[in-house]
Image (cartoon, rainbow, N blue to C red):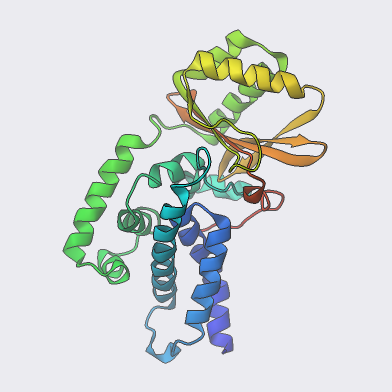
Amino acid sequence: MTKAATDAFVTHRNLLFTVAYEMLGSAADAEDVLQETWLRWVGVDLDEVRDQRAYLVRITTRLALTRLRTLRRRRESYIGPWLPEPLLTSPDVAEDVELADSVSMAMLLVLETLGPTERAVFVLREVFDLPYEEIAATVARSAATVRQIAHRARAHVAARRPRGSVSPAQARAALEAFQRATETGDLRHLLDILAPDVVLLGDGGGVVQAVQRPIVGADKVSRLLLAGFGKVAGLATIEPAQVNGWPALILRMGGAIDTVLAVRIDDGRISGLYAVRNPEKLSRIGTETAVSR
């Protein structure tokens, strides 16, 4: 182990974590990938490395691809809807619009619909702006093939990503209105905030209670939410937070984090509600996680 190797890894650690997290949607698995990356990195002859950042990204991406294929098989037997592991992020992440968009819960769910190689190519090209030749070396494809994969992936994501630009301030305002409506039991105002085709997903992982299938439609979602919030009125506290680069809500029961609620906003209204309740996915939400490009 050399000081040069350690310094290089520490310098790029947040970037490598972000690459792995965007590939996997799991902070725990991203950390495992970083550990494996470090073990590979300390065995590399640095005199043979022209670009340390690119080399480390290549190792991380390859390891994440291998892990993603395993996770895909595991998620097929996951109990109920699967949601990405939420991260408490610092306010400056929101200032980098592209980074905040790429780690948002809504975008991570869109990335889940891509194949592993497509996901790697999209993340490396669209988020981290790596040259096609470098991506080609990473995913073991020709540069021409990578260009085609990137084109397909961009079209796929564009058709599924949130419609209409929304600022963090607008998202915060929508969440504040949502919180007021649920806490006061105001059905009319809740219906005004929700898109007609809003989808509610709950992730309990089979460990805690959560909706076992997507709930679709403003009327069904609003009535379910009001009934749920009505049951915990006076017992739960709800606080705003910065999660995955965007405003979100954290619900606590007895001081302990019970649920992280993130949203997707289309054309100014909430079109997706993502309630993460699986305790295994909430272990990191108490402290900020650094992400970077």
Q: Residue at x 39, y 69 (%)?
A: 62
The answer to whether residue 116 shows anywhere in this view is yes
Q: In the rendered image of this protein, does residue 20 appear above or below residue 165? A: below
Which quadrant, please, contains the N terminus? bottom right
From the top left corner, tell me how far across and down residue 60 is, in percent: 44, 69
Q: Looking at this view, is 14 or 185 the one in front?
A: 185
205, 2: nearer the viewer: 205
Residue at image location 46% in from the left, 49% down from the top: 75
Q: Is residue 265 left or right of residue 174?
A: left
Q: Would residue 129 appear left or right of 43 to someone viewing this image?
A: left
Tell me the quarter of the picture where residue 206 sits.
Answer: top right
From the top left corner, tell me how far across and down residue 133 is, in percent.
25, 68
Q: Position of residue 26 (x, y in %)?
A: 53, 54
Question: What x and y, as percent, mark residue 144?
Answer: 16, 62
Q: Nearer the viewer, residue 143 or 90?
A: 143
Residue placed farthest to the top in the image?
188
Q: Is residue 22 visible?
A: no
In the image, what residue occupies the spot 58% across and 46% down?
Answer: 86
Quick one: which residue is furthest to the left in this view?
A: 144
Q: In this image, 19 relative to 185: left or right?
A: left
- State whether residue 235 is above or below residue 94: above
